[in-house]
Image (cartoon, rainbow, N blue to C red):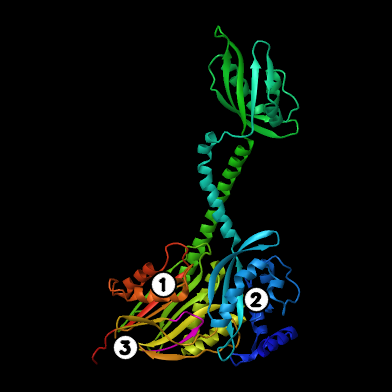
Amino acid sequence: MDGKDAEILDAAQAGSIHIARGIAGSGGSLLDIAAVFERAPVGFAVVDGQMRFLYVNPAFLSVHGGPVTGDHVGNLMHEVVPADFTATVDPLVAEVLTTGVVHRDIETRVEAGSAIKQLLLNLFPLCDSDDNVIAAVIAVQDVTRSHEVAELEGLRLHAEWTDRLDRAHRAGGTGSWEVDLRNGRVAWSANLCRIAGVNQSPNSLEDVLALVHPDDVDVARASFTGLTAHTSTPDVEYRLCTPDGRVVVLSSIAEPVTDTTGTIVSLRGMCVDRTLRRTAEADTRAAVVRADRMTAELEDERQIVLQLQRALLPPSIPVVEGTDLAATYLPANSSAGVGGDFFDAFPLPDGRLAIAVGDVIGHDVEAAVTMGRVRSAIRAYAMQNPLPDRVLSELNRLVCASGDMTMTTVFYGVYTPRDGGLCYANAGHPHPLVVRDGVATPMAHRHGLITGAVKHAGYLQFETSLRPGDALVVYTDGLVEHRGEDIDSGTQALCAAITAPHLPQRLDDLVPAVIKAVAPEQGRDDICVLALRRGPVRPE
């Protein structure tokens, strides 16, 4: 353990953790983070390079089935959480600490107590004022219910084949029987007696009917008497009530037996125990009903959240002379649900244009509500003082101070249409692209901390200039982060798609075409894209 790790751990155990002389140069501490995380419904933990806990909130412990009390600061992660969880998380944490990369929406299965849970993981770096990564933050969300719904949906498909397989699988649980019509005596095989739960064969047909379920007596009697007159079907199903209180379902296949004169002298048949099959069919039908109900409920919830999210997005984007603007929002179609991606563009009092694109951590109602509050706050702060570093600093303080708001990545900039000038700041958001002379290139600048991570975080402001014909493309990570692919490959594919020669030139058509070309059709996360193009210089 090096000196910095020892300093962090000692301070953590003392209850006041000042990281590298204050996070972002403002005296920040993990206590600032704890104030945000302690009551969060999502599990959060902060670990160092040795996989020791610097902070862990109750939700993180609860989701793994452990006690939510006790001080785990300084403990190794594998001492507190299941081994299969650490096996998944350890290499991701190492990558965060080494490269500062952000991992989003990674699913894993863990054994928590006596239950198997499906977890959704997000990991991101915690940096000091010099932008050095000093710890990793792990966010954990339980998405087990969504996967259970998917499993119930599988039962629906199985139910459609139950009837077809019914006659094809007549194996096991069988017994033979015979009725001698000359003396009325009944003979059951030993296995049929076992199925019916009796010690010996019934003596007569009336003894057999006494075991039949009262609701099925008429069906069974008609089957036996009909066989003697060649008027009943050879296949009939009825229930028996066993002496120990069980109900078994029998499917009987029978035929009459004649003597040399053609007279029916006996009946004989084979019974198949259908109890387990019929119980499974009933369970399957019930599961289908439950799956239908749960699917409908989840879809209703998703539509409500989606309507709320769309209502919180701007109904239109402004028309700015000499500037083309286009924006698109596409909701997720994965099991994680609707997220908190957003965009905004609005004119400032001095004639400049403010733009913002952000992504709230998490999904569903909480993320949508946070998204609306963040977007409104950005507008309010921009109207007071539009400088990007100030707007993001104020927004960060708001998110940190609000216990019901979740952390959010934000790119915010101020564009001057007259000369193409752009000043901007970035709070943990993917780097936008600049398209110049047919080539798309990610903008080069340092990320600031994600808003809500540290109370006194500071943000750097950068400046650039768009030439006539240049375009700026700002997007959320759902456009470039796909399952089984790294984000660099996704960014390269996006750059290639934006500059492909066959795509339309109008931004209103280009943005949805690029999304269609890059984003997967299934398992897609939320996507927001905002594009701005500087028009040709007009003579004065």
Q: Quadrant of residue 436?
A: bottom left
Contact? badges 2 and 3 (CB < 8 Å): no
Q: Earlier in the sequence, mark 1 or mark 2?
A: 2
Q: Residue furthest left?
A: 539
Q: Tell me the kind of residue under disc 2.
A: Ala
Question: Which residue is painted at 50% across and 66% down in the image?
Answer: 338
Which type of secondary structure does the marked residue at label 3 adopt?
loop
Q: Tell me the kind of residue under disc 3.
A: Arg
The residues bearing labels 1 and 2 have C-alpha atoms spaced at a distance of: 38 Å
334 or 185, nearer to the observer: 185
The mark found on residue 315 in the picture is 1
Which type of secondary structure does the marked residue at label 2 adopt?
strand
Contact? badges 3 and 1 (CB < 8 Å): no
Region in magenta: 421-431
Q: Earlier in the sequence, mark 2 or mark 3?
A: 2
Q: Earlier in the sequence, mark 3 or mark 1?
A: 1
Where the C terminus falls, by quadrant?
bottom left
Mark 3 or 1: the one toward you:
3
Majority secondary structure of the magenta segment? strand
Q: Tell me the kind of residue under disc 1.
A: Pro
Determine whether, in the image, residue 243 is placed left or right of residue 522.
right
Q: Which residue is mark 2?
A: 45
Q: Residue furthest top?
A: 261
Could you tell me residue 10's position as x and y percent?
Answer: 73, 86
Determine whether, in the image, residue 205 is placed left or right of residue 393.
right
Q: Is residue 125 above or below residue 204?
A: below
53 or 345, nearer to the observer: 53
The residues bearing labels 2 and 3 have C-alpha atoms spaced at a distance of: 45 Å
